[in-house]
Amino acid sequence: MERTTLQAPDISCDHCIQTIHAAVEKVPGVRFVSGDADGKFVVVEYDPNLAQVAAIEQAMDDEGYPVKK
């Protein structure tokens, strides 16, 4: 398992976190998603053999929460 922290400046509330969680958990290989609305970040634990960070970022972007690079 690997873990990554993604900054998403458009996160503003717990509903944002719930939306991101629902989208990211659909990415095959994602095992854990947690977010912090105040810190504007999401922590994702995933199996690198099944999931890539780019796919996780795309899932967030598709929901309107682009990752800050």
Image (cartoon, grey):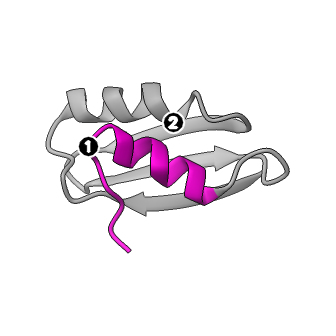
In the rendered image, residue 12, in percent from the top left (x then y), is placed at 14, 44
Q: Residue at x 58, y 27 (%)?
A: 26
Residue 26 higher or lower than 5, as above or below: above
Identify the mark nearer the N-term, 1 or 2.
2
**Residue, far right:** 49
Residue 42 higher or lower than 53, as above or below: above
Q: Residue 24, labelled with which disc?
A: 2
**Magenta-drawn segment:** 53-69
In the rendered image, residue 52, in percent from the top left (x then y), is placed at 68, 55
Q: Residues within 10 Å of mark 1 (few under 14, many from 20)?
A: some
**Residue, far bottom:** 69
Separation of residues labelled 1 and 2 (CA atoms): 12 Å
Q: Is residue 21 left or right of residue 38?
A: right
Q: Secondary structure at mark 1?
A: loop
Instruction: Say whether marks 1 and 2 touch (CB < 8 Å).
Output: no
The type of residue carrying mark 2 is: Val
Q: Which residue is mark 1?
A: 64
Residue 1 higher or lower than 63, as above or below: below
Q: Which quarter of the picture shows residue 53?
A: bottom right
Q: Residue at x 22, y 27 (%)?
A: 15
Q: Residue at x 56, y 30 (%)?
A: 25
